Structures are given as C-alpha cells and as structure tokens.
Amino acid sequence: MTGATGIAAATARRLSESNARVFVISLHQDECQELARDVGLNGWAAADLTNEDAAIEAFASAREALGGIDGLAVVAGGSGRRFGDGMVHEMSLAAWEATLSLNVGTSFNSVRPVVGPMVESGGGSIVLISSVLASHPVPDMFATHAYAAAKGAQQSLARAMASQYAADRIRVNVVAPGLVRTPMAGRAASDPDILDFAGRKQPLAGGMLEPEDIAGAICFLLSDDSSLITGQVLHVDGGWSVSSASP
C-alpha cells in the first residue's frame, strides 16, 4: 500500500484486522512509524514515489518482507494547490507537471514494480484511488484542473492495464471518492460553505465522508469477493455524482 494517513491508514487498519499482511510505503518516516505502532504492519518504507529509483527500492523491500505482493492499493497522491494548481489559464506548466507527477507519476512508479512479479506469480489485484472530480467537477469550489486531469488519467491507466493483464489474472480497478475528511481536505473541512455544499451534494453521508467509508471499498476490490471485477471505476461519493447541490 502507498500512503500512511487518511484513506491509506484506514485501509491498512482494516486489512490488518482481516489478518492480511500489510506493508506501507509513504513519503514521511514519522507517519509510517506512527501507523506501524497503531496497526502493527509487516513492514514499511519511507520513499518519495515520484522518484523512480526510490520506488523500485521501496517495492523490493516490500516483496522481501511479504514474500511477494498479491494486492496493491495506490493511495499516495494529493492536492496540487501548493504548486499553483488552479484554472488552466492561470496555471504554470511547472504547477501542471508537479501535480501530475504527485498523482499519476506516483501511480506509475507504484504499479510498474508490482505488475511483472504478479504476472509471474499468477495474478493479483491493484486498486488506484481517483476522485469524483475527474468526472463530476464543481468549478466554483474545486477549480483545480491539473488534479482533475491527473485523477482522470488514473482511471484511463487502470482500464488500459485491466485490458492488458486480464489474461494474467491481474485485476485493476479504481475507487473514486467524494469529499473525504482527510489531512488533504483540511481547507474544505474548515470552510462552512463547502461543508454546507457537502451536506447537500453527498446526502447519503450528510456531509463529508470518512476515510473508513473508502477503505471498505478498497478492501472489497482487493479481496477474492471481487475476483471477476476488473477495469471498473467505483464511485464512493455519498451520492455526489447523482445529486444536485441546490438548496
């Protein structure tokens, strides 16, 4: 698994509770250590997954610790606001590239070291984490075009991989969350207007979703219960994609 807070932490906890062996790769050592103390991981590595060599080394450590990898949840990524992500006509190329690197680059660097060994071992399951904003934008509140493009690219990558590797019994799916209460969503969680919007746009949740809501979907797609599902995008959005936000 990539990531150590929010959705990633909730997923690691749920997997551990089901007696799965869990190895976490994330950027910050302190977050990995805290999660390991909380969950009881089978190992962790602090690595910058935008860096090819660091990713290869981290996943080699994961394979050694686990004796192989048959499931991967790619949760690492995040907002590009700090790089200058926003509307296309106001964004620099540097902001665009940094946001794609943080999201699509980390996905590529995570799946590439895993797919080859999965082919050799007879299969596995990969889950990428996208966003409802890839297909259901809200321009007046979430005008981050590079982030939306990156999350759409993850969905396209998953479908292409699912088609390519189905014969190798490798399943590749996507979970597209709505607005979730995570460290990344701190801006939204402190904005009364966005919270009011979330209450109307995500009526099944009555507000922001919790990381545990997304973890359940990820664990399902990693499990044998979804053994015939591949190439799909599962929206876990509290009704965002089918609801009006009108008062």
Image (cartoon, rainbow, N blue to C red):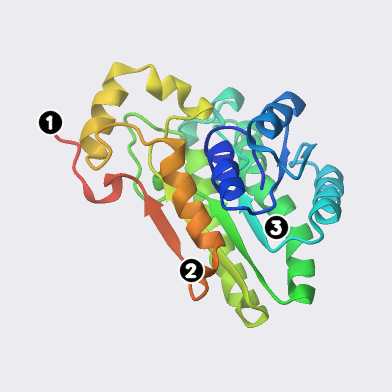
Residue type pointed to by label 2? Asp
Residue in the image at 57% along x and 65% along y = 172
Residue 80 image-quadrant placement? top right
Residue type pointed to by label 3? Val
Instruction: Say which residue label 1 marks.
Output: 247
Rate crowding at label 1 as few (under 14), some (14 to 19) or many (20 or more) other CA atoms within 10 Å: few
Whether residue 230 is visible to the viewer of this picture, yes or no, is no
Residue 62 x %, y %: 80, 50
Residue 2 x %, y %: 67, 44
Quadrant that contains the C terminus: top left
Name the residue furthest left.
Answer: 247
Which of the marked residues, 1 or 2, is nearer the chain's N terminus? 2
Which of the marked residues, 2 or 3, is nearer the chain's N terminus? 3
Look at the numbered disc 3 and give the secondary structure of its residue. Answer: helix
Residue 166 image-quadrant placement? bottom right
Residue 78 x %, y %: 57, 35
Left or right of residue 220, residue 138 in this image: left
Instruction: Say which residue label 2 marks.
Output: 225
Q: Marks 3 and 1: CB-CB under 8 Å?
A: no
Which mark lies nearer to you, 2 or 3?
2
Instruction: Say which residue label 3 marks.
Output: 111
Marks 1/2: CA distance? 39 Å
Give whichever of 136, 57 is nearer the camera.
57
Left or right of residue 92, residue 70 in this image: right
